[in-house]
Amino acid sequence: MTENKRTEHKRTEHKKAADNVVFVGGKPPMNYVLAVVTQFHNGANEVHIKARGRAISRAVDVAEIVRHRFMSELKVDNISIGTEHMQSESGDKLNISSIDIQLKR
């Protein structure tokens, strides 16, 4: 019986730092819009929208759709851009652009 309690305890652990982050990828923008709006409706005061490479424009679209169509009281608090250094399968060095858009109530 103690093993069941340990297992249940592990399942209920949450990482608070990642709760307010939405990673944008190749899905349609409305999927990510729903994720952002859900975070705010669940009590988050700020949400980070993060993307890399070709998904950057989709992340900007997500932020603008949320702000203009769903939650007009939100403000863009901070936008961080950067470059992540990665290595391809063939061993070449790759520079991939990244963005972090912070929306705040």
Image (cartoon, rainbow, N blue to C red):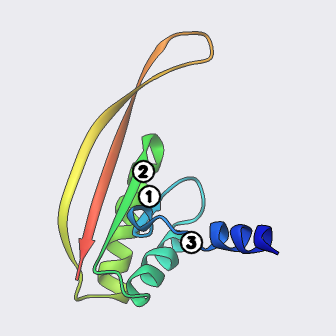
Q: Are marks 2 and 3 in contact (CB under 8 Å)?
A: no
Q: Earlier in the sequence, mark 3 or mark 1?
A: 3
Q: Are marks 1 and 2 in contact (CB under 8 Å)?
A: yes
Which residue is tagged 2? 51
Q: Disc 3 residue type?
A: Asn
Q: Position of residue 7 (x, y in %)?
A: 73, 67
Q: Position of residue 42 (x, y in %)?
A: 44, 87
Which corner quadrant holds the N terminus? bottom right
Q: Residue at x 56, y 72 (%)?
A: 31
Q: Nearer the viewer, residue 45 or 16?
A: 16
Q: Quadrant of residue 77?
A: bottom left
Which residue is tagged 1? 58
Q: Secondary structure at mark 3?
A: helix
Which residue is tagged 3? 31
Q: Earlier in the sequence, mark 2 or mark 3?
A: 3
> Which of the two marks, 1 or 2, is nearer to us in this view?
2
